Image (spheres, rainbow, N blue to C red):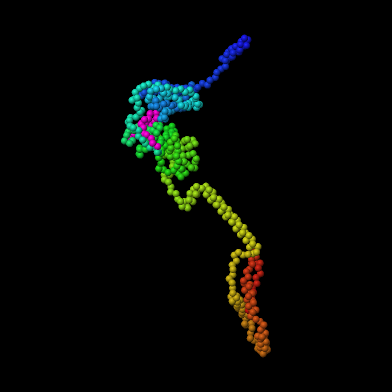
Protein backbone atom coordinates (compact mmCIF):
# COMPACT_ATOMS: atom_id res chain seq x y z
CA UNK A 1 0.00 0.00 0.00
CA UNK A 2 2.79 2.36 0.89
CA UNK A 3 4.53 1.51 -2.38
CA UNK A 4 1.43 2.43 -4.39
CA UNK A 5 1.19 5.74 -2.60
CA UNK A 6 4.83 6.53 -3.40
CA UNK A 7 4.32 5.71 -7.10
CA UNK A 8 1.21 7.86 -7.23
CA UNK A 9 3.05 10.78 -5.66
CA UNK A 10 5.89 10.49 -8.20
CA UNK A 11 3.49 10.37 -11.15
CA UNK A 12 1.57 13.34 -9.82
CA UNK A 13 4.80 15.29 -9.47
CA UNK A 14 5.78 14.54 -13.04
CA UNK A 15 2.40 15.68 -14.31
CA UNK A 16 2.78 18.93 -12.45
CA UNK A 17 6.26 19.49 -13.98
CA UNK A 18 5.19 18.97 -17.61
CA UNK A 19 3.65 22.47 -18.06
CA UNK A 20 6.91 23.98 -16.88
CA UNK A 21 8.74 22.90 -20.09
CA UNK A 22 8.23 25.19 -23.12
CA UNK A 23 7.50 23.67 -26.55
CA UNK A 24 9.40 25.32 -29.46
CA UNK A 25 8.00 24.94 -33.01
CA UNK A 26 9.32 26.38 -36.28
CA UNK A 27 6.71 28.76 -37.64
CA UNK A 28 6.36 29.22 -41.45
CA UNK A 29 7.05 32.56 -43.12
CA UNK A 30 3.69 32.50 -44.86
CA UNK A 31 1.34 30.35 -46.89
CA UNK A 32 0.33 29.54 -50.46
CA UNK A 33 -3.43 29.14 -50.53
CA UNK A 34 -6.08 28.45 -53.20
CA UNK A 35 -9.78 28.75 -53.71
CA UNK A 36 -11.94 25.62 -54.13
CA UNK A 37 -14.47 26.44 -56.87
CA UNK A 38 -17.30 24.38 -58.32
CA UNK A 39 -18.32 24.21 -61.99
CA UNK A 40 -19.89 22.04 -64.69
CA UNK A 41 -18.61 20.41 -67.83
CA UNK A 42 -18.08 22.97 -70.60
CA UNK A 43 -18.14 25.95 -68.24
CA UNK A 44 -15.24 28.23 -67.38
CA UNK A 45 -13.95 28.22 -63.82
CA UNK A 46 -11.51 30.53 -62.07
CA UNK A 47 -8.93 29.35 -59.55
CA UNK A 48 -7.21 31.94 -57.38
CA UNK A 49 -3.73 31.40 -55.95
CA UNK A 50 -2.61 33.69 -53.11
CA UNK A 51 0.98 33.92 -51.87
CA UNK A 52 1.08 35.64 -48.46
CA UNK A 53 4.10 36.42 -46.30
CA UNK A 54 4.10 36.92 -42.56
CA UNK A 55 7.77 38.03 -42.50
CA UNK A 56 7.66 41.22 -44.49
CA UNK A 57 7.39 42.14 -48.15
CA UNK A 58 7.79 39.58 -50.88
CA UNK A 59 10.58 39.61 -53.44
CA UNK A 60 10.78 37.43 -56.54
CA UNK A 61 8.12 34.76 -56.74
CA UNK A 62 8.09 31.54 -58.72
CA UNK A 63 5.42 28.92 -58.05
CA UNK A 64 5.06 25.80 -60.19
CA UNK A 65 1.61 24.20 -60.36
CA UNK A 66 0.26 20.96 -61.78
CA UNK A 67 -3.27 20.01 -62.85
CA UNK A 68 -5.06 17.21 -64.70
CA UNK A 69 -5.13 18.28 -68.35
CA UNK A 70 -7.80 15.67 -69.06
CA UNK A 71 -10.21 17.33 -66.61
CA UNK A 72 -9.19 20.95 -67.04
CA UNK A 73 -7.91 22.99 -69.96
CA UNK A 74 -5.96 26.10 -69.03
CA UNK A 75 -7.28 29.18 -70.78
CA UNK A 76 -5.49 32.25 -69.39
CA UNK A 77 -3.93 33.81 -66.34
CA UNK A 78 -2.08 36.94 -65.24
CA UNK A 79 1.60 36.16 -64.71
CA UNK A 80 0.96 32.48 -65.46
CA UNK A 81 2.75 30.52 -68.18
CA UNK A 82 1.58 27.13 -69.43
CA UNK A 83 4.02 24.42 -70.50
CA UNK A 84 1.35 22.48 -72.41
CA UNK A 85 1.76 19.29 -70.37
CA UNK A 86 -0.50 20.05 -67.38
CA UNK A 87 1.96 22.34 -65.63
CA UNK A 88 1.87 26.05 -64.95
CA UNK A 89 4.42 28.58 -63.69
CA UNK A 90 3.35 31.64 -61.73
CA UNK A 91 5.97 34.39 -61.61
CA UNK A 92 5.95 37.83 -60.03
CA UNK A 93 8.13 40.46 -58.41
CA UNK A 94 6.14 40.92 -55.20
CA UNK A 95 6.64 44.33 -53.63
CA UNK A 96 4.06 43.72 -50.92
CA UNK A 97 3.18 41.05 -48.38
CA UNK A 98 0.68 39.37 -50.70
CA UNK A 99 0.58 38.36 -54.38
CA UNK A 100 -2.43 36.96 -56.22
CA UNK A 101 -2.56 34.89 -59.42
CA UNK A 102 -5.92 34.34 -61.16
CA UNK A 103 -6.18 31.34 -63.48
CA UNK A 104 -9.06 30.50 -65.80
CA UNK A 105 -9.83 26.90 -66.75
CA UNK A 106 -12.50 25.13 -68.81
CA UNK A 107 -14.01 22.00 -67.30
CA UNK A 108 -13.71 19.02 -69.61
CA UNK A 109 -15.18 16.11 -67.67
CA UNK A 110 -17.30 15.43 -64.62
CA UNK A 111 -15.62 14.70 -61.28
CA UNK A 112 -13.28 16.18 -58.72
CA UNK A 113 -9.83 17.40 -59.74
CA UNK A 114 -7.13 19.49 -58.10
CA UNK A 115 -4.54 22.14 -58.75
CA UNK A 116 -1.51 21.64 -56.51
CA UNK A 117 1.94 23.11 -55.89
CA UNK A 118 4.85 21.24 -57.47
CA UNK A 119 7.52 23.60 -56.17
CA UNK A 120 8.02 27.17 -55.04
CA UNK A 121 10.89 29.63 -54.75
CA UNK A 122 9.90 32.66 -52.72
CA UNK A 123 12.32 35.43 -51.77
CA UNK A 124 11.89 38.31 -49.38
CA UNK A 125 12.43 41.92 -50.35
CA UNK A 126 15.80 41.81 -48.56
CA UNK A 127 16.96 38.88 -50.68
CA UNK A 128 16.42 36.06 -48.18
CA UNK A 129 14.52 32.85 -48.86
CA UNK A 130 11.07 32.37 -47.36
CA UNK A 131 9.51 29.06 -46.39
CA UNK A 132 5.76 28.99 -46.97
CA UNK A 133 3.13 26.38 -46.22
CA UNK A 134 1.66 24.96 -49.41
CA UNK A 135 -2.00 24.34 -50.00
CA UNK A 136 -3.99 23.10 -53.02
CA UNK A 137 -7.23 23.74 -54.86
CA UNK A 138 -10.01 21.21 -55.25
CA UNK A 139 -12.28 21.78 -58.23
CA UNK A 140 -15.62 20.00 -58.29
CA UNK A 141 -17.02 19.51 -61.79
CA UNK A 142 -20.64 18.59 -62.17
CA UNK A 143 -22.52 17.31 -65.19
CA UNK A 144 -22.82 19.94 -67.88
CA UNK A 145 -22.95 20.53 -71.64
CA UNK A 146 -19.91 19.08 -73.45
CA UNK A 147 -20.84 21.02 -76.58
CA UNK A 148 -19.59 24.16 -74.90
CA UNK A 149 -16.07 22.87 -74.98
CA UNK A 150 -14.21 24.92 -77.59
CA UNK A 151 -10.61 25.76 -78.37
CA UNK A 152 -9.84 29.04 -76.64
CA UNK A 153 -8.47 31.61 -79.04
CA UNK A 154 -9.49 29.65 -82.14
CA UNK A 155 -11.44 31.74 -84.66
CA UNK A 156 -10.95 29.72 -87.80
CA UNK A 157 -11.90 26.26 -86.64
CA UNK A 158 -9.47 24.82 -89.15
CA UNK A 159 -7.85 21.46 -88.61
CA UNK A 160 -4.24 21.19 -87.47
CA UNK A 161 -1.71 21.15 -90.32
CA UNK A 162 1.36 18.95 -90.23
CA UNK A 163 4.69 20.71 -90.68
CA UNK A 164 8.31 19.57 -90.56
CA UNK A 165 11.00 21.28 -88.48
CA UNK A 166 14.54 19.94 -88.88
CA UNK A 167 13.26 16.45 -89.65
CA UNK A 168 10.72 16.34 -86.80
CA UNK A 169 6.96 16.29 -87.45
CA UNK A 170 4.76 18.89 -85.74
CA UNK A 171 1.19 20.11 -86.08
CA UNK A 172 0.35 23.77 -86.52
CA UNK A 173 -2.39 24.57 -84.03
CA UNK A 174 -4.51 27.58 -83.20
CA UNK A 175 -5.19 26.15 -79.75
CA UNK A 176 -3.05 28.34 -77.49
CA UNK A 177 -4.03 30.46 -74.53
CA UNK A 178 -3.38 34.11 -73.90
CA UNK A 179 -0.98 33.15 -71.14
CA UNK A 180 1.13 31.17 -73.61
CA UNK A 181 1.88 34.22 -75.74
CA UNK A 182 5.42 35.56 -75.15
CA UNK A 183 5.75 39.03 -73.70
CA UNK A 184 5.67 41.75 -76.34
CA UNK A 185 3.67 39.69 -78.87
CA UNK A 186 0.04 39.98 -79.93
CA UNK A 187 -2.31 37.73 -81.86
CA UNK A 188 -2.51 38.00 -85.62
CA UNK A 189 -4.01 36.09 -88.52
CA UNK A 190 -1.67 34.64 -91.15
CA UNK A 191 -2.51 32.84 -94.40
CA UNK A 192 -0.80 29.45 -94.39
CA UNK A 193 -1.43 26.90 -97.16
CA UNK A 194 -4.63 28.65 -98.13
CA UNK A 195 -6.02 28.81 -94.62
CA UNK A 196 -6.26 31.62 -92.08
CA UNK A 197 -4.23 30.55 -89.07
CA UNK A 198 -3.83 32.14 -85.67
CA UNK A 199 -0.27 33.23 -84.87
CA UNK A 200 1.42 35.93 -82.82
CA UNK A 201 3.66 38.76 -83.96
CA UNK A 202 5.98 41.39 -82.52
CA UNK A 203 5.20 44.68 -84.21
CA UNK A 204 8.56 46.34 -83.47
CA UNK A 205 10.64 43.57 -85.04
CA UNK A 206 8.14 41.95 -87.44
CA UNK A 207 8.79 38.48 -86.00
CA UNK A 208 5.89 36.02 -86.43
CA UNK A 209 5.47 32.90 -84.32
CA UNK A 210 3.30 29.84 -84.88
CA UNK A 211 2.11 27.42 -82.21
CA UNK A 212 3.23 23.84 -82.96
CA UNK A 213 2.38 20.59 -81.19
CA UNK A 214 4.79 17.65 -81.09
CA UNK A 215 3.84 13.98 -81.18
CA UNK A 216 3.03 13.99 -77.45
CA UNK A 217 0.72 16.98 -77.77
CA UNK A 218 3.17 19.37 -76.10
CA UNK A 219 2.97 22.80 -77.66
CA UNK A 220 5.48 25.59 -78.14
CA UNK A 221 5.98 28.61 -80.36
CA UNK A 222 8.24 28.39 -83.40
CA UNK A 223 9.63 31.13 -85.60
CA UNK A 224 7.70 31.46 -88.86
CA UNK A 225 9.49 32.51 -92.04
CA UNK A 226 6.95 33.99 -94.46
CA UNK A 227 9.37 33.89 -97.41
CA UNK A 228 9.39 30.09 -97.67
CA UNK A 229 6.54 29.22 -95.24
CA UNK A 230 8.81 27.26 -92.91
CA UNK A 231 9.24 27.06 -89.16
CA UNK A 232 12.39 27.00 -87.03
CA UNK A 233 13.04 26.79 -83.27
CA UNK A 234 12.37 29.98 -81.33
CA UNK A 235 14.16 31.16 -78.21
CA UNK A 236 13.81 34.69 -76.92
CA UNK A 237 16.53 36.11 -74.66
CA UNK A 238 16.28 39.34 -72.71
CA UNK A 239 19.66 41.08 -72.80
CA UNK A 240 18.44 44.26 -71.10
CA UNK A 241 15.29 45.82 -69.68
CA UNK A 242 14.30 47.20 -73.08
CA UNK A 243 15.98 44.87 -75.58
CA UNK A 244 15.53 41.20 -76.37
CA UNK A 245 16.87 38.97 -79.12
CA UNK A 246 15.47 35.93 -80.88
CA UNK A 247 17.99 33.34 -82.03
CA UNK A 248 17.82 32.48 -85.71
CA UNK A 249 18.56 29.19 -87.42
CA UNK A 250 19.52 30.86 -90.67
CA UNK A 251 23.10 31.88 -91.47
CA UNK A 252 24.21 35.42 -92.12
CA UNK A 253 25.77 36.63 -95.36
CA UNK A 254 28.82 38.01 -93.61
CA UNK A 255 31.66 35.61 -93.04
CA UNK A 256 33.30 35.25 -89.66
CA UNK A 257 37.07 35.11 -89.13
CA UNK A 258 38.83 31.79 -89.64
CA UNK A 259 39.29 31.40 -85.89
CA UNK A 260 35.56 30.57 -85.54
CA UNK A 261 34.40 26.99 -86.03
CA UNK A 262 30.75 26.12 -86.66
CA UNK A 263 29.11 24.16 -83.86
CA UNK A 264 25.61 23.53 -82.48
CA UNK A 265 24.42 25.46 -79.43
CA UNK A 266 21.63 23.90 -77.36
CA UNK A 267 19.43 26.23 -75.29
CA UNK A 268 16.41 24.90 -73.38
CA UNK A 269 16.45 21.75 -75.48
CA UNK A 270 16.54 23.66 -78.79
CA UNK A 271 19.43 23.51 -81.23
CA UNK A 272 20.78 26.61 -82.95
CA UNK A 273 23.77 27.09 -85.26
CA UNK A 274 26.67 28.83 -83.55
CA UNK A 275 30.33 29.53 -84.15
CA UNK A 276 32.88 28.84 -81.43
CA UNK A 277 35.99 30.98 -81.08
CA UNK A 278 38.88 28.48 -81.07
CA UNK A 279 41.20 31.08 -79.53
CA UNK A 280 38.85 31.88 -76.61
CA UNK A 281 37.33 28.97 -74.76
CA UNK A 282 33.67 29.38 -73.80
CA UNK A 283 32.83 32.12 -76.32
CA UNK A 284 30.27 31.59 -79.10
CA UNK A 285 28.75 33.75 -81.80
CA UNK A 286 25.07 33.35 -82.71
CA UNK A 287 22.91 34.98 -85.34
CA UNK A 288 19.83 36.72 -83.95
CA UNK A 289 17.29 39.48 -84.50
CA UNK A 290 16.65 42.05 -81.80
CA UNK A 291 13.37 43.60 -80.71
CA UNK A 292 13.86 46.43 -83.25
CA UNK A 293 14.08 44.01 -86.17
CA UNK A 294 17.84 44.38 -86.71
CA UNK A 295 19.65 41.15 -87.54
CA UNK A 296 23.26 40.57 -86.60
CA UNK A 297 25.80 38.56 -84.70
CA UNK A 298 25.85 38.34 -80.92
CA UNK A 299 28.65 36.91 -78.80
CA UNK A 300 27.59 34.52 -76.06
CA UNK A 301 29.74 34.02 -72.95
CA UNK A 302 29.06 30.51 -71.71
CA UNK A 303 30.62 31.08 -68.28
CA UNK A 304 28.56 34.21 -67.47
CA UNK A 305 25.53 33.50 -69.67
CA UNK A 306 25.61 36.98 -71.21
CA UNK A 307 25.16 38.28 -74.76
CA UNK A 308 26.65 41.30 -76.48
CA UNK A 309 26.64 42.56 -80.04
CA UNK A 310 29.50 41.30 -82.21
CA UNK A 311 30.79 42.96 -85.38
CA UNK A 312 32.11 40.58 -88.03
CA UNK A 313 35.52 41.49 -89.43
CA UNK A 314 34.72 41.00 -93.11
CA UNK A 315 31.94 40.37 -95.58
CA UNK A 316 33.61 37.86 -97.87
CA UNK A 317 35.95 35.00 -97.28
CA UNK A 318 39.47 35.64 -98.43
CA UNK A 319 40.99 33.27 -100.95
CA UNK A 320 43.77 31.20 -99.47
CA UNK A 321 47.13 31.50 -101.20
CA UNK A 322 48.71 28.03 -101.23
CA UNK A 323 51.94 29.17 -102.87
CA UNK A 324 55.26 29.18 -101.04
CA UNK A 325 55.16 32.94 -100.56
CA UNK A 326 51.59 32.71 -99.28
CA UNK A 327 52.55 30.05 -96.73
CA UNK A 328 55.52 32.14 -95.65
CA UNK A 329 53.26 35.19 -95.30
CA UNK A 330 50.73 33.26 -93.19
CA UNK A 331 53.55 31.91 -91.03
CA UNK A 332 54.86 35.43 -90.47
CA UNK A 333 51.36 36.68 -89.62
CA UNK A 334 50.92 33.95 -87.03
CA UNK A 335 54.41 34.39 -85.55
CA UNK A 336 54.92 38.14 -86.05
CA UNK A 337 56.29 38.67 -82.55
CA UNK A 338 58.84 35.89 -82.93
CA UNK A 339 59.90 37.21 -86.34
CA UNK A 340 60.39 40.73 -84.97
CA UNK A 341 62.48 39.30 -82.12
CA UNK A 342 64.65 37.28 -84.52
CA UNK A 343 65.11 40.29 -86.80
CA UNK A 344 66.10 42.45 -83.84
CA UNK A 345 68.64 39.88 -82.65
CA UNK A 346 70.03 39.63 -86.19
CA UNK A 347 70.53 43.40 -86.38
CA UNK A 348 72.27 43.40 -82.99
CA UNK A 349 74.60 40.56 -84.07
CA UNK A 350 75.49 42.37 -87.32
CA UNK A 351 76.25 45.59 -85.42
CA UNK A 352 78.47 43.68 -82.97
CA UNK A 353 80.35 42.00 -85.85
CA UNK A 354 80.90 45.37 -87.55
CA UNK A 355 82.25 46.87 -84.32
CA UNK A 356 84.59 43.89 -83.72
CA UNK A 357 85.92 43.99 -87.29
CA UNK A 358 86.42 47.76 -87.09
CA UNK A 359 88.41 47.42 -83.85
CA UNK A 360 90.53 44.62 -85.30
CA UNK A 361 91.22 46.63 -88.45
CA UNK A 362 92.16 49.69 -86.38
CA UNK A 363 94.57 47.65 -84.25
CA UNK A 364 96.08 46.04 -87.36
CA UNK A 365 96.68 49.44 -88.96
CA UNK A 366 98.30 50.68 -85.75
CA UNK A 367 100.61 47.65 -85.68
CA UNK A 368 101.57 48.22 -89.32
CA UNK A 369 102.32 51.89 -88.63
CA UNK A 370 104.57 50.92 -85.73
CA UNK A 371 106.29 48.33 -87.92
CA UNK A 372 106.87 50.86 -90.71
CA UNK A 373 108.27 53.39 -88.22
CA UNK A 374 110.56 50.79 -86.65
CA UNK A 375 112.04 49.44 -89.91
CA UNK A 376 111.78 52.61 -91.99
CA UNK A 377 109.42 51.12 -94.54
CA UNK A 378 107.85 53.64 -96.89
CA UNK A 379 104.32 52.68 -97.74
CA UNK A 380 104.08 54.92 -100.79
CA UNK A 381 107.47 54.27 -102.49
CA UNK A 382 107.21 53.80 -106.19
CA UNK A 383 108.89 50.99 -108.04
CA UNK A 384 111.43 52.13 -110.59
CA UNK A 385 111.17 50.50 -113.98
CA UNK A 386 113.78 47.85 -114.70
CA UNK A 387 116.59 49.16 -116.82
CA UNK A 388 118.50 47.05 -119.22
CA UNK A 389 122.24 47.18 -119.72
CA UNK A 390 122.27 49.09 -123.01
CA UNK A 391 120.28 51.89 -121.41
CA UNK A 392 122.74 52.02 -118.52
CA UNK A 393 125.67 52.19 -120.88
CA UNK A 394 124.02 54.92 -122.86
CA UNK A 395 123.46 56.89 -119.67
CA UNK A 396 127.06 56.35 -118.69
CA UNK A 397 128.20 57.45 -122.09
CA UNK A 398 126.09 60.54 -121.87
CA UNK A 399 127.47 61.31 -118.45
CA UNK A 400 131.03 60.80 -119.78
CA UNK A 401 130.35 63.05 -122.74
CA UNK A 402 129.08 65.78 -120.48
CA UNK A 403 132.18 65.45 -118.33
CA UNK A 404 134.44 65.67 -121.32
CA UNK A 405 132.59 68.69 -122.60
CA UNK A 406 133.03 70.32 -119.23
CA UNK A 407 136.73 69.61 -119.31
CA UNK A 408 137.00 71.08 -122.78
CA UNK A 409 135.19 74.17 -121.59
CA UNK A 410 137.64 74.48 -118.76
CA UNK A 411 140.48 74.04 -121.17
CA UNK A 412 139.10 76.75 -123.40
CA UNK A 413 139.24 79.13 -120.48
CA UNK A 414 142.96 79.44 -120.95
CA UNK A 415 143.77 82.40 -123.15
CA UNK A 416 145.62 81.47 -126.26
CA UNK A 417 147.34 84.79 -126.09
CA UNK A 418 149.04 83.68 -122.95
CA UNK A 419 150.94 81.17 -124.99
CA UNK A 420 152.72 82.85 -127.80
CA UNK A 421 154.53 80.93 -130.40
CA UNK A 422 157.67 82.79 -129.63
CA UNK A 423 157.69 81.47 -126.16
CA UNK A 424 158.02 77.98 -127.52
CA UNK A 425 160.90 78.07 -129.88
CA UNK A 426 161.29 75.11 -132.08
CA UNK A 427 164.94 75.22 -131.55
CA UNK A 428 164.75 74.61 -127.87
CA UNK A 429 162.96 71.32 -128.39
CA UNK A 430 164.44 68.34 -130.00
CA UNK A 431 161.85 67.03 -132.34
CA UNK A 432 163.50 63.72 -132.69
CA UNK A 433 163.69 63.19 -128.99
CA UNK A 434 160.11 64.09 -128.55
CA UNK A 435 159.03 61.76 -131.24
CA UNK A 436 160.91 58.95 -129.65
CA UNK A 437 159.34 59.71 -126.35
CA UNK A 438 155.93 59.77 -127.97
CA UNK A 439 156.52 56.52 -129.65
CA UNK A 440 157.53 54.93 -126.41
CA UNK A 441 154.66 56.45 -124.51
CA UNK A 442 151.93 55.55 -126.98
CA UNK A 443 153.08 52.05 -127.59
CA UNK A 444 149.96 49.81 -127.73
CA UNK A 445 151.78 46.88 -126.35
CA UNK A 446 152.13 48.59 -123.02
CA UNK A 447 148.32 48.85 -122.74
CA UNK A 448 147.48 45.31 -123.77
CA UNK A 449 146.62 44.24 -120.20
CA UNK A 450 143.78 46.78 -120.17
CA UNK A 451 140.57 45.07 -121.08
CA UNK A 452 137.09 46.30 -121.92
CA UNK A 453 135.72 44.07 -119.22
CA UNK A 454 136.83 46.63 -116.69
CA UNK A 455 134.52 49.15 -118.26
CA UNK A 456 131.71 46.63 -118.21
CA UNK A 457 132.28 46.01 -114.53
CA UNK A 458 131.97 49.72 -113.83
CA UNK A 459 128.75 49.86 -115.79
CA UNK A 460 127.39 46.93 -113.81
CA UNK A 461 128.28 48.70 -110.61
CA UNK A 462 126.34 51.74 -111.75
CA UNK A 463 123.37 49.53 -112.49
CA UNK A 464 123.48 47.97 -109.03
CA UNK A 465 123.75 51.35 -107.40
CA UNK A 466 120.83 52.61 -109.47
CA UNK A 467 118.63 49.57 -108.67
CA UNK A 468 119.18 49.62 -104.93
CA UNK A 469 116.36 51.39 -103.12
CA UNK A 470 117.29 54.00 -100.59
CA UNK A 471 116.37 53.06 -97.06
CA UNK A 472 114.19 55.37 -95.10
CA UNK A 473 115.66 56.56 -91.87
CA UNK A 474 113.54 57.83 -89.02
CA UNK A 475 113.65 61.61 -88.64
CA UNK A 476 116.00 61.89 -91.63
CA UNK A 477 116.82 65.40 -92.79
CA UNK A 478 118.33 66.46 -96.13
CA UNK A 479 121.25 68.22 -94.47
CA UNK A 480 122.18 65.09 -92.52
CA UNK A 481 123.09 63.18 -95.72
CA UNK A 482 126.58 63.32 -97.28
CA UNK A 483 126.19 63.11 -101.03
CA UNK A 484 129.04 62.23 -103.43
CA UNK A 485 128.90 62.62 -107.18
CA UNK A 486 130.81 59.96 -109.06
CA UNK A 487 132.57 61.04 -112.28
CA UNK A 488 132.95 58.62 -115.06
CA UNK A 489 136.59 58.74 -116.24
CA UNK A 490 135.86 57.26 -119.63
Say if the magenta span includes residue 244.
no
From the viewer's side, name the closer residue of 47 and 16. Answer: 16
Residue 436 falls in image quadrant: bottom right
- State the residue at coordinates (48%, 49%): 330
Q: Position of residue 162 (x, y in %)?
A: 36, 35
Q: Is residue 55 above or below residue 7?
A: below
Give the residue furthest to the left: 194
Look at the picture and state if 90 lies above or below 320: above
**Camera-side residue: 122 or 448?**
122
Whether residue 207 is visible? no
Q: Residue furthest top?
A: 1
Q: Residue furthest front?
A: 1
Horizontal relation, residue 415 to residue 58: left or right:
right
Q: Is residue 95 left or right of residue 384?
A: left
Image point (49%, 42%), residue name: 279
Q: Is residue 179 magenta?
A: yes
* Towards the viewer: 26 or 85: 85
State the image coordinates of residue 367 (x, y, percent, origin top left).
63, 60
Image label count: 0
- Toward the viewer: 409 or 157? 157
Q: Quadrant of the C terminus?
A: bottom right
Question: Residue 454 at x, y = what percent?
Answer: 65, 79
Query: In the rendering, at what x and y percent does residue 453 appear?
Result: 64, 79
Q: In the picture shown, does residue 390 fall above or below 420?
A: above
Q: Is residue 336 left or right of residue 167?
A: right
Residue 179 visible somewhere in the drawing: yes
Quadrant position of residue 197: top left
Which quadrant is the N terminus positioned in?
Answer: top right
| Range of residues picked out in magenta | 168-191
Amino acid sequence: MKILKKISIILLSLCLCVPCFSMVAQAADGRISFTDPETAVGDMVEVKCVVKSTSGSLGNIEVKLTYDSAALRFDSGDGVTAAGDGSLTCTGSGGSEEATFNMKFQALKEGDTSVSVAGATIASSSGGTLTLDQGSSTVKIAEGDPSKITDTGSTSGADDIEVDVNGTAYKLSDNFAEADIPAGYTKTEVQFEGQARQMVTQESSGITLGYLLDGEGKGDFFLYNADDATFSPFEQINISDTTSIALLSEKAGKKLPKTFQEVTLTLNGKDFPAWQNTEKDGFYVVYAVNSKGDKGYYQYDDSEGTYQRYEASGGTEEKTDDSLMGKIGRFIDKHIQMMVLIAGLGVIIVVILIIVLAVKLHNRNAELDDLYDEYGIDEEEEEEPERNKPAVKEKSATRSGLKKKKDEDNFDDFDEDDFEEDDFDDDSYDDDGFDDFEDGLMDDDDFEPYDDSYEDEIDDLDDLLGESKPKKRCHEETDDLFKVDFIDLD
